[in-house]
Image: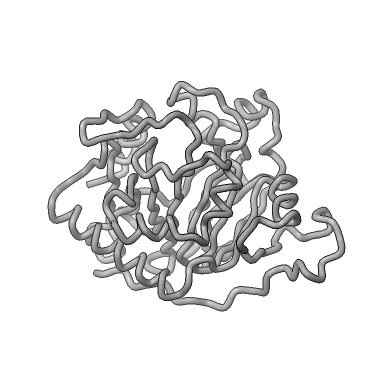
Amino acid sequence: MTLVSSPIADAPPCLDESTFAGTVEDLPLSTRFRLQAEITPVQQAFLDLHGFIVFSQVARPDEVRAILDDIQSVTDRLVASGQRTIYGVPIWIGDDPDGAPLLQRMAFTTVMSEYLKAFVRDERFEPVRRVVGEDARIGDEEKDGAVFNTYINVEGGLRPNLAWHTDGLRDVFYHLKPAPPMFNIGLHFDRIRPDDGGLYVIPGTHEQSIWSTLFSKIHFVSQKPDPQELHVETWPGDLTIHDGRMWHRVATSTKTGWQSIRRSMYVPYVRDAYDPKSEDSEPLLYHRLFDWIMKLRGAR
Protein backbone atom coordinates (compact mmCIF):
# COMPACT_ATOMS: atom_id res chain seq x y z
CA MET A 1 0.00 0.00 0.00
CA THR A 2 1.32 3.45 -0.89
CA LEU A 3 1.51 5.82 2.06
CA VAL A 4 -0.96 8.62 1.52
CA SER A 5 0.13 12.17 2.19
CA SER A 6 -0.92 13.51 5.55
CA PRO A 7 -4.01 15.73 5.55
CA ILE A 8 -3.16 19.34 6.28
CA ALA A 9 -4.87 20.68 9.39
CA ASP A 10 -5.14 24.32 10.35
CA ALA A 11 -2.65 25.10 13.09
CA PRO A 12 -3.39 27.49 15.94
CA PRO A 13 -2.13 31.04 15.51
CA CYS A 14 1.50 31.92 16.15
CA LEU A 15 2.58 34.46 18.72
CA ASP A 16 2.16 38.00 17.39
CA GLU A 17 5.56 39.32 18.33
CA SER A 18 4.72 42.82 17.12
CA THR A 19 2.27 43.24 20.00
CA PHE A 20 3.98 41.06 22.62
CA ALA A 21 5.19 43.22 25.50
CA GLY A 22 5.98 40.60 28.15
CA THR A 23 8.94 38.31 28.79
CA VAL A 24 9.48 34.75 27.62
CA GLU A 25 8.76 33.57 31.15
CA ASP A 26 5.20 34.80 30.56
CA LEU A 27 4.70 32.64 27.47
CA PRO A 28 3.11 29.18 27.72
CA LEU A 29 5.32 26.27 26.73
CA SER A 30 2.87 25.53 23.90
CA THR A 31 3.67 28.85 22.17
CA ARG A 32 4.13 28.54 18.42
CA PHE A 33 6.31 30.92 16.43
CA ARG A 34 6.56 32.07 12.81
CA LEU A 35 9.95 31.47 11.16
CA GLN A 36 11.14 34.75 9.67
CA ALA A 37 14.24 35.96 7.84
CA GLU A 38 16.00 36.19 11.21
CA ILE A 39 15.49 34.46 14.55
CA THR A 40 13.96 37.17 16.70
CA PRO A 41 15.18 38.06 20.22
CA VAL A 42 11.96 36.61 21.69
CA GLN A 43 12.45 33.34 19.79
CA GLN A 44 16.10 33.09 20.82
CA ALA A 45 15.25 33.80 24.45
CA PHE A 46 12.50 31.14 24.43
CA LEU A 47 14.93 28.57 22.99
CA ASP A 48 17.67 29.53 25.44
CA LEU A 49 15.32 29.26 28.42
CA HIS A 50 13.43 26.07 27.60
CA GLY A 51 15.77 24.23 25.22
CA PHE A 52 13.18 23.85 22.44
CA ILE A 53 10.99 25.88 20.09
CA VAL A 54 8.24 25.14 17.51
CA PHE A 55 7.96 27.01 14.21
CA SER A 56 4.54 26.68 12.61
CA GLN A 57 4.14 24.98 9.22
CA VAL A 58 7.47 25.98 7.73
CA ALA A 59 6.86 23.47 4.92
CA ARG A 60 3.86 24.30 2.73
CA PRO A 61 1.06 21.74 2.22
CA ASP A 62 2.23 20.97 -1.33
CA GLU A 63 5.78 20.43 -0.04
CA VAL A 64 4.57 18.07 2.69
CA ARG A 65 2.80 15.99 0.06
CA ALA A 66 5.80 16.06 -2.28
CA ILE A 67 8.20 14.98 0.48
CA LEU A 68 6.04 12.04 1.55
CA ASP A 69 5.55 10.96 -2.05
CA ASP A 70 9.30 11.15 -2.64
CA ILE A 71 10.02 9.09 0.49
CA GLN A 72 7.61 6.45 -0.81
CA SER A 73 9.53 6.34 -4.11
CA VAL A 74 12.81 5.89 -2.23
CA THR A 75 11.23 3.15 -0.12
CA ASP A 76 10.04 1.30 -3.21
CA ARG A 77 13.54 1.43 -4.72
CA LEU A 78 15.24 0.20 -1.55
CA VAL A 79 12.80 -2.67 -1.04
CA ALA A 80 13.04 -3.73 -4.69
CA SER A 81 16.85 -3.65 -4.67
CA GLY A 82 17.25 -5.40 -1.32
CA GLN A 83 19.60 -2.66 -0.11
CA ARG A 84 19.81 -2.70 3.69
CA THR A 85 22.46 -0.10 4.53
CA ILE A 86 23.34 3.41 3.40
CA TYR A 87 26.96 4.41 4.02
CA GLY A 88 27.20 1.57 6.52
CA VAL A 89 24.15 2.59 8.57
CA PRO A 90 21.38 -0.04 8.68
CA ILE A 91 17.99 0.65 7.11
CA TRP A 92 15.16 -0.63 9.27
CA ILE A 93 12.19 -2.08 7.44
CA GLY A 94 9.20 -3.47 9.29
CA ASP A 95 5.60 -4.18 8.34
CA ASP A 96 2.81 -1.75 7.61
CA PRO A 97 -0.78 -2.50 8.79
CA ASP A 98 -1.38 -4.47 5.58
CA GLY A 99 1.74 -6.60 6.01
CA ALA A 100 3.73 -4.85 3.29
CA PRO A 101 7.30 -3.58 3.85
CA LEU A 102 7.46 -0.22 5.62
CA LEU A 103 10.69 1.72 5.87
CA GLN A 104 10.88 2.89 9.48
CA ARG A 105 14.29 4.50 9.75
CA MET A 106 16.55 5.67 6.98
CA ALA A 107 19.80 7.56 7.53
CA PHE A 108 21.37 9.75 4.85
CA THR A 109 17.93 10.46 3.38
CA THR A 110 19.09 13.38 1.25
CA VAL A 111 21.73 11.15 -0.33
CA MET A 112 18.83 9.09 -1.69
CA SER A 113 16.64 12.04 -2.72
CA GLU A 114 17.69 15.00 -4.84
CA TYR A 115 14.36 16.69 -4.05
CA LEU A 116 15.01 16.60 -0.32
CA LYS A 117 18.64 17.58 -0.74
CA ALA A 118 17.51 20.77 -2.47
CA PHE A 119 14.59 21.33 -0.09
CA VAL A 120 16.67 21.41 3.10
CA ARG A 121 18.92 24.02 1.46
CA ASP A 122 16.07 26.40 0.75
CA GLU A 123 16.75 29.98 1.82
CA ARG A 124 13.97 29.88 4.44
CA PHE A 125 16.11 27.55 6.60
CA GLU A 126 19.09 29.90 6.72
CA PRO A 127 18.02 31.41 10.10
CA VAL A 128 17.89 27.89 11.53
CA ARG A 129 21.43 27.17 10.34
CA ARG A 130 22.65 30.36 12.00
CA VAL A 131 21.05 29.34 15.31
CA VAL A 132 23.39 26.35 15.29
CA GLY A 133 26.34 28.54 14.31
CA GLU A 134 27.55 30.86 11.59
CA ASP A 135 29.99 28.15 10.55
CA ALA A 136 27.36 25.36 10.54
CA ARG A 137 26.74 23.30 7.42
CA ILE A 138 24.23 20.63 6.44
CA GLY A 139 25.93 17.30 7.04
CA ASP A 140 24.28 15.19 4.34
CA GLU A 141 27.09 12.66 4.34
CA GLU A 142 28.35 13.00 7.92
CA LYS A 143 27.42 11.08 11.07
CA ASP A 144 23.93 9.71 10.20
CA GLY A 145 23.02 12.43 7.71
CA ALA A 146 19.35 13.41 7.46
CA VAL A 147 17.28 10.73 9.21
CA PHE A 148 13.69 10.00 8.17
CA ASN A 149 11.60 8.16 10.77
CA THR A 150 8.24 6.45 10.42
CA TYR A 151 6.58 5.27 13.62
CA ILE A 152 3.51 3.09 13.46
CA ASN A 153 1.74 1.11 16.17
CA VAL A 154 1.09 -2.26 14.60
CA GLU A 155 2.27 -5.84 14.96
CA GLY A 156 5.48 -5.98 12.98
CA GLY A 157 6.21 -2.30 13.62
CA LEU A 158 9.78 -1.86 14.78
CA ARG A 159 9.90 1.49 16.55
CA PRO A 160 6.69 2.31 18.41
CA ASN A 161 8.63 4.30 21.00
CA LEU A 162 12.05 5.47 22.11
CA ALA A 163 12.83 5.64 25.82
CA TRP A 164 14.28 8.63 27.66
CA HIS A 165 17.71 9.70 26.46
CA THR A 166 19.98 12.61 25.77
CA ASP A 167 22.22 12.89 22.75
CA GLY A 168 25.40 13.30 24.76
CA LEU A 169 26.04 9.56 24.60
CA ARG A 170 25.90 9.67 20.82
CA ASP A 171 28.93 11.93 20.63
CA VAL A 172 30.87 9.61 22.94
CA PHE A 173 30.68 7.10 20.10
CA TYR A 174 32.06 9.76 17.78
CA HIS A 175 34.98 10.34 20.21
CA LEU A 176 33.73 13.77 21.18
CA LYS A 177 32.87 15.38 24.50
CA PRO A 178 29.28 16.63 24.90
CA ALA A 179 29.32 20.38 24.41
CA PRO A 180 26.67 23.00 23.69
CA PRO A 181 24.87 23.49 21.48
CA MET A 182 23.52 20.12 20.35
CA PHE A 183 20.47 21.16 18.36
CA ASN A 184 18.15 18.66 16.71
CA ILE A 185 16.26 20.17 13.77
CA GLY A 186 13.08 18.24 12.99
CA LEU A 187 10.50 18.51 10.24
CA HIS A 188 7.15 16.91 11.01
CA PHE A 189 4.62 15.57 8.54
CA ASP A 190 1.57 14.52 10.55
CA ARG A 191 -0.93 16.04 12.97
CA ILE A 192 0.29 14.75 16.33
CA ARG A 193 -1.75 15.17 19.50
CA PRO A 194 -0.82 13.74 22.91
CA ASP A 195 -2.79 10.53 22.23
CA ASP A 196 -0.76 10.14 19.02
CA GLY A 197 2.44 9.74 21.00
CA GLY A 198 5.46 11.57 19.63
CA LEU A 199 8.13 13.79 21.11
CA TYR A 200 8.25 14.55 24.84
CA VAL A 201 10.87 16.84 26.35
CA ILE A 202 11.74 18.02 29.85
CA PRO A 203 12.16 21.77 29.41
CA GLY A 204 15.27 23.29 30.90
CA THR A 205 17.24 20.06 31.23
CA HIS A 206 19.54 21.14 28.41
CA GLU A 207 21.47 22.96 31.15
CA GLN A 208 21.71 19.99 33.51
CA SER A 209 24.99 18.73 34.94
CA ILE A 210 27.03 15.93 33.43
CA TRP A 211 26.04 13.81 36.46
CA SER A 212 22.31 14.35 35.75
CA THR A 213 22.88 13.65 32.06
CA LEU A 214 24.46 10.32 32.81
CA PHE A 215 22.49 9.10 35.81
CA SER A 216 19.13 10.83 36.42
CA LYS A 217 17.53 8.33 34.02
CA ILE A 218 18.70 5.12 32.38
CA HIS A 219 19.31 6.00 28.74
CA PHE A 220 17.10 4.12 26.27
CA VAL A 221 15.54 2.07 29.10
CA SER A 222 13.49 4.43 31.28
CA GLN A 223 10.06 5.08 29.79
CA LYS A 224 8.08 6.25 32.80
CA PRO A 225 6.36 9.63 32.25
CA ASP A 226 8.06 12.47 34.07
CA PRO A 227 6.07 15.06 36.08
CA GLN A 228 7.93 17.86 34.27
CA GLU A 229 7.63 16.47 30.75
CA LEU A 230 5.97 18.34 27.89
CA HIS A 231 4.38 16.82 24.81
CA VAL A 232 5.48 18.67 21.66
CA GLU A 233 2.30 18.86 19.59
CA THR A 234 2.84 19.26 15.85
CA TRP A 235 0.99 19.98 12.64
CA PRO A 236 2.13 18.89 9.16
CA GLY A 237 4.99 21.11 8.03
CA ASP A 238 6.08 22.19 11.52
CA LEU A 239 9.76 22.62 12.28
CA THR A 240 11.07 22.00 15.79
CA ILE A 241 14.41 22.72 17.38
CA HIS A 242 15.34 20.95 20.57
CA ASP A 243 18.65 20.82 22.33
CA GLY A 244 19.82 17.23 22.38
CA ARG A 245 21.35 17.69 25.84
CA MET A 246 17.83 17.78 27.30
CA TRP A 247 15.99 14.62 28.29
CA HIS A 248 13.58 13.59 25.55
CA ARG A 249 11.65 10.51 24.51
CA VAL A 250 9.23 9.33 21.83
CA ALA A 251 5.97 7.82 23.06
CA THR A 252 3.80 5.18 21.42
CA SER A 253 0.50 6.24 19.90
CA THR A 254 -2.62 5.06 21.71
CA LYS A 255 -4.05 4.37 18.25
CA THR A 256 -3.23 1.42 16.01
CA GLY A 257 -2.90 0.83 12.29
CA TRP A 258 -2.67 3.63 9.78
CA GLN A 259 -4.18 6.11 12.25
CA SER A 260 -1.04 5.80 14.37
CA ILE A 261 1.45 6.81 11.67
CA ARG A 262 3.92 9.51 12.65
CA ARG A 263 6.63 10.74 10.29
CA SER A 264 9.53 13.11 10.84
CA MET A 265 12.91 13.98 9.38
CA TYR A 266 15.85 15.31 11.36
CA VAL A 267 18.33 17.43 9.42
CA PRO A 268 21.95 17.52 10.64
CA TYR A 269 23.67 20.88 11.04
CA VAL A 270 27.34 20.16 11.70
CA ARG A 271 30.17 22.30 13.05
CA ASP A 272 32.83 19.63 13.58
CA ALA A 273 35.72 18.99 11.21
CA TYR A 274 34.42 17.62 7.91
CA ASP A 275 34.14 13.84 8.24
CA PRO A 276 32.06 12.32 5.43
CA LYS A 277 30.90 8.73 5.24
CA SER A 278 31.03 6.65 2.09
CA GLU A 279 29.80 3.38 0.61
CA ASP A 280 32.74 1.66 2.35
CA SER A 281 31.93 2.99 5.83
CA GLU A 282 31.44 0.49 8.64
CA PRO A 283 28.60 0.85 11.16
CA LEU A 284 29.55 2.18 14.57
CA LEU A 285 28.99 0.17 17.74
CA TYR A 286 25.68 1.84 18.56
CA HIS A 287 24.46 1.17 14.99
CA ARG A 288 25.29 -2.51 15.46
CA LEU A 289 23.57 -2.59 18.85
CA PHE A 290 20.34 -1.05 17.61
CA ASP A 291 20.38 -3.14 14.46
CA TRP A 292 20.60 -6.27 16.63
CA ILE A 293 17.64 -5.04 18.69
CA MET A 294 15.61 -4.27 15.56
CA LYS A 295 16.31 -7.71 14.13
CA LEU A 296 15.06 -9.27 17.36
CA ARG A 297 11.86 -7.29 16.80
CA GLY A 298 11.52 -8.69 13.31
CA ALA A 299 13.28 -6.24 10.99
CA ARG A 300 13.46 -7.48 7.41
Relative image position of residue 180 (x, y in whole percent): 62, 33
Q: In the shown orientation, is residue 145 left or right of residue 253?
A: left
| Vertical order, 123 against 279 (above or below) | below
Q: How many marks?
A: 0
Q: Residue at x 66, y 64 (%)?
A: 33
Q: In the shown orientation, is residue 279 left or right of residue 183?
A: left
Q: Which residue is at the front of the view, 40 or 295?
A: 40
Q: Is residue 227 visible?
A: no
| Vertical order, 217 against 1 (above or below) | above
- Its colouring scheme is one colour
Q: In the shown orientation, is residue 24 left or right of residue 105?
A: right
Q: Which residue is at the front of the view, 92 or 128?
A: 128
Q: Residue at x 26, y 45 (%)?
A: 299
Q: Residue at x 31, y 43 (%)?
A: 297
Q: Residue at x 49, y 60 (%)?
A: 123
| Residue 120: quarter of image | bottom left
Relative image position of residue 289 (x, y in whole percent): 35, 30
Relative image position of residue 71 (x, y in whole percent): 30, 61
Residue extending furthest toward the right: 22
Quarter of the figure with the N terminus: bottom left
Relative image position of residue 192 (x, y in whole percent): 53, 65
Q: Is residue 219 visible?
A: yes
